[in-house]
């Protein structure tokens, strides 16, 4: 998410400094996405969870599981 989405969801952004994650008066801390073009291309619209599920499925097949 970007800073606007983080704030709209009721979270505080730690974009200015990682130290804000421990010094802000909330435990609802959002981390804005780094839009790195070649990584976004590799993800091809998938979430990190989608990629992890695909890798897990490939490992299960390789290990002989379902």
Image (cartoon, rainbow, N blue to C red):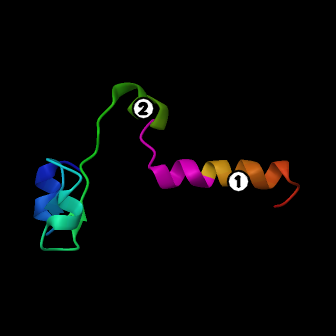
| Callouts 2 and 1 close, C-beta under 8 Å | no
Against 63, is 46 above or below? above
Residue 39, numbered circle? 2
Foreground mark, 2 or 1, reads 2
Residue at numbered disc 1: 57
Relative image position of residue 56 (x, y in whole percent) = 68, 54
Please tell me whether mark 1 sits on a helix, a strand or a loop.
Answer: helix
In this picture, residue 15 sits left or right of residue 44: left
Residue at 34%, 27% in the rendered image: 37
Against 25, is 45 above or below? above
The image quadrant of residue 9 is bottom left
Residue 25 lies within the magenta run:
no
Q: Which residues are magenta?
A: 44-53
Residue at 84%, 60% in the rendered image: 65
State the CA–CA distance, disc 2 to disc 1.
Answer: 21 Å
Within-10-Å neighbours for mark 2: few <14, some 14–19, many 20+: few
Residue 50 lies within the magenta run:
yes
């Amino acid at each position: 998410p970007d800073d606007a989405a983080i704030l709209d969801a009721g979270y505080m952004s730690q974009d200015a400094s990682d130290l804000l994650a421990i010094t802000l008066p909330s435990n609802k801390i959002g981390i804005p996405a780094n839009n790195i073009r070649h990584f976004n291309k590799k993800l091809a619209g998938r979430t990190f969870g989608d990629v992890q599920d695909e890798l897990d499925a490939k490992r299960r097949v390789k290990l002989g599981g379902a």
